[in-house]
Image (spheres, helix red, strand yellow):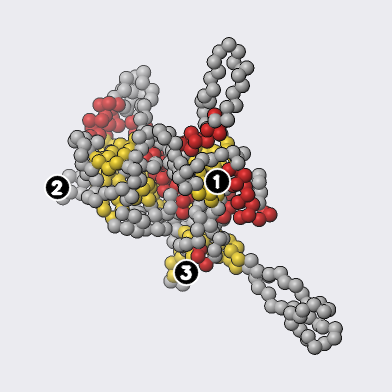
Amino acid sequence: MAATELAVEAIELESFVEEIPDLQAHFDKLQTRLEKGGKKIQCSFSTNRGGVQRAPFWAGTRVQGGAPIQQFGLGTSAPIGGDSSSSPYVPAWSRGSGSSFVSMCASPLRFVNVCELSNLAKQATDGKERGLVKFSREEMDKSLLAFDNGVEAVLNRDGSGTIDQIPTTATINNNTGATGPQKSSIVGLNTAASFVDQQVVQVLSGIGGTNRGSFTISFVDPVTQTVFSAGALPAGTALGDILVIQGATGAAGSSVYGKDYWIQNGNVGTKGGVDISQYPGRFSSPTINFGGSGTIVNSTAQRVQSIRMRAMGDDYDKNEKCFWYANPVQGVALSGNYYNPGYTRIDEGGDKVIDTAKKFMQDTWAGDEIVWSSTAEPSRMDRIVASAFTFGELFPTRLHEWTPGNPIAAVPVNDGTGSTYYDSQMFAYERGFNLLCPEMKQQFFLQGLPIPADA
């Protein structure tokens, strides 16, 4: 608590100060859009039927058609069955078949964050004489933003609890810096914005691989894609390792089934308890793989439409409500479609040189809205139909009640010295949920997109 006591000196505000500047960036766009456009159902944590534990929520889907067409024997036609010796030939109906259905299921995962406040820190801004900003109120507000940022991270990923993978182009500085918050760092991550200050993350060699240990992030710098630590990183931390949220195992399907879990191309593995290799093509999201070269051009929109027409058949709805979800670096790449053709007319602007640089990134691409997010993978763009996603909620984001009706708790010492409570209080946010999207073929994504330099 010593650090908190010292920090309070920086927030003993004068009466004219109305707001504490917040230098920590926060991100939650995918969570917001999926909750807005998707479905929500209330579910329990687990169910037991006949002594068998079952997932508490599920979504069914038709995976194979039935009743195949054939030519029916009639007159002199080649017989299918029946009495071929009779004249005229009397056909018989053949046996038929029906559709096949499967249900994908999931169990909610619980996420929590805890904030502990010194009573002296609260007292420093308590009352009109000391300041207009209440420390506890500000901490509740900022803790909620950090919590949503953490939920956003797992919603973006593949269901293993992985938040990011250390790229081969990154730089790992393990215990090489000066003492303080920059003693260790990982520079050049894909989405540093997915992490939050003071977060504990595990380092694994890969999905389901060796757990090298964990470290605490002191500061996140989303501009330089860097996370810092005041301590050493786990021994053996290497390029290609994955960074996993504390409490998850790093195994496939062990955390929230996020965007990358559902929007994927291929017929291998298990999704929501269903072996998708038994249903080739039915759970594979169409994609265009740029392989790290080339660029998105205007005609890419028609390529997307052509592939989706084949995937969805004549049920394809060109006006389907959806949005593109992408990292802002791809907004830089897309801007070339505007600047490169040279749309500026020489007779514009009168006697002044025209400002040909547009201030904002485009709001749409290929006629659909774009949601720009720094937590999205930089080399990928996802076309998301949010109505295909279902949230199974054990409970929404809320303040945890330590006792009924009381979200604030004293902090017991429990060190065997006879001391009772620390001079502090704590509160916590919590949420229990998981995500299902059996309509994976309805989604679409571009992958392997080149990343513009210095974007």
Q: Which residue is mark 2?
A: 417
How far apart marks 2 and 3 lie (CA) works out to: 48 Å
Measuring from the top left, give residue 38's x and y in whole percent: 55, 48
Measuring from the top left, give residue 85's x and y in whole percent: 80, 88
Q: Please name the residue shown 43% across and 49% down the image.
A: 157
**In this figure, what is the number of numbered marks?**
3
Say left or right for 47 vs 99. Answer: left
Measuring from the top left, give residue 96's x and y in whole percent: 68, 75
Look at the numbered disc 2 and give the secondary structure of its residue.
loop
Can residue 57 be seen here? no
Quarter of the view holding residue 195: top left
Q: Amino acid at mark 3?
A: Arg
Can residue 238 be seen here? yes
Say left or right for 390 vs 239. Answer: right
Q: Amino acid at mark 1?
A: Arg
Between residue 168 and residue 56, name the one nearer to us: 168
Q: Amino acid at mark 2?
A: Thr
Measuring from the top left, give residue 353's x and y in whole percent: 54, 15
How far apart marks 1 and 2 lie (CA) works out to: 59 Å
Q: Which residue is mark 3?
A: 49
Q: In the rendered structure, find residue 359 and report the number of the disc placed on it.
A: none
How far apart marks 3 and 1 lie (CA) works out to: 38 Å
Q: Which residue is mark 1?
A: 383
